[in-house]
Image (tube, helix red, strand yellow):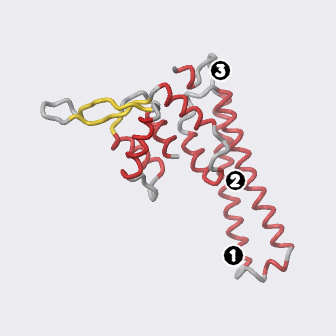
Amino acid sequence: MYELLILSSLMMHVPMHGYLIAKIINDTIGPYTKVSNGRLYPLLAKLVEEGCIEEVEATSSGRKGDRQAKAYRITNTGILRWHQLMMDTVSNPGDYQRIFFIKSCCLKPLTPAERLYLIDHYINYCQAHVLHLQHEIKDMESDPLKHQYILSVEAVLRAMQHRIGEWQLELAWVRQLREQELAQPQELPATNAEAQL
């Protein structure tokens, strides 16, 4: 997830300092989850080593006496890696709700077909959660043996109904995202991340 966030931040093709990358990541995943310097800077170093990003020298204000600070810029290899991460729908299925939120903010460089693929995949992901919870509720209501292992069946059923409501809201949002995508004027071919190389 952090690799996708770093590369997505740098897709603007503007060199960024590590602290600005950290701020963008923390604003995106916050308020309770934060990326630490101990996690961010080793990942930046790994991405540099892999050729996905490169270090560039930059000053904070250009005034005499300002020390040189590292800034990072995405490379062609990084754009390809970003594209690979964006199109990945099978890794980290348990965290995919959070990952899709990140992806939804970075869809523009993809082709219309790629954007629709990701949106449709997430619609199916949300629907699967709703159907699973509905099935579990029916199963729990029809099997009195399960009741003996649960302290408060009513509380569990209410919590499951609440989760269904959350997934239905998520589903409504992603369907709206799909409608907005379909309403966009068709772009010329070769607008995906690979064409930016």
Is residue 19 left or right of 190 when viewed as pictured?
A: left
What distance separates the C-alpha of mark 2 from that of mark 1? 20 Å
Q: Residue furthest left?
A: 65
Q: Secondary structure at mark 2?
A: helix
Is residue 122 left or right of 30 when viewed as pictured?
A: right
Q: Is 136 above or below relative to 71?
A: below
Name the residue: 23% across, 32% down: 59
Q: Residue furthest right?
A: 142
Ranked by sequence position, the earlier of labels 2 and 3 is 2
Q: Residues within 10 Å of mark 2 (few under 14, many from 20)?
A: some
Task: Check contact, mark 2 vs mark 1: CB within 8 A.
Answer: no
Q: Is 196 above or below relative to 46?
A: above
Q: Any mark on residue 186, and which?
A: 3
Q: Residue furthest front?
A: 49
Q: Is 132 above or below relative to 177?
A: below
Q: Secondary structure at mark 1?
A: helix
Judging depth in this view, the residue of 130 and 85 nearest the camera is 85
What distance separates the C-alpha of mark 2 from that of mark 3? 29 Å
Residue that carries the numbered disc 1 in the rendered image = 155
Q: Residues within 10 Å of mark 3 (few under 14, many from 20)?
A: few
Judging depth in this view, the residue of 76 and 66 nearest the camera is 76
Q: Amino acid at mark 1?
A: Ala
Q: Residue furthest top?
A: 188
Q: Position of residue 151 (x, y in %)?
A: 70, 82
Q: Amino acid at mark 2?
A: Gln
Q: Position of residue 194 (x, y in %)?
A: 57, 23
Residue that carries the numbered disc 2 in the rendered image = 168
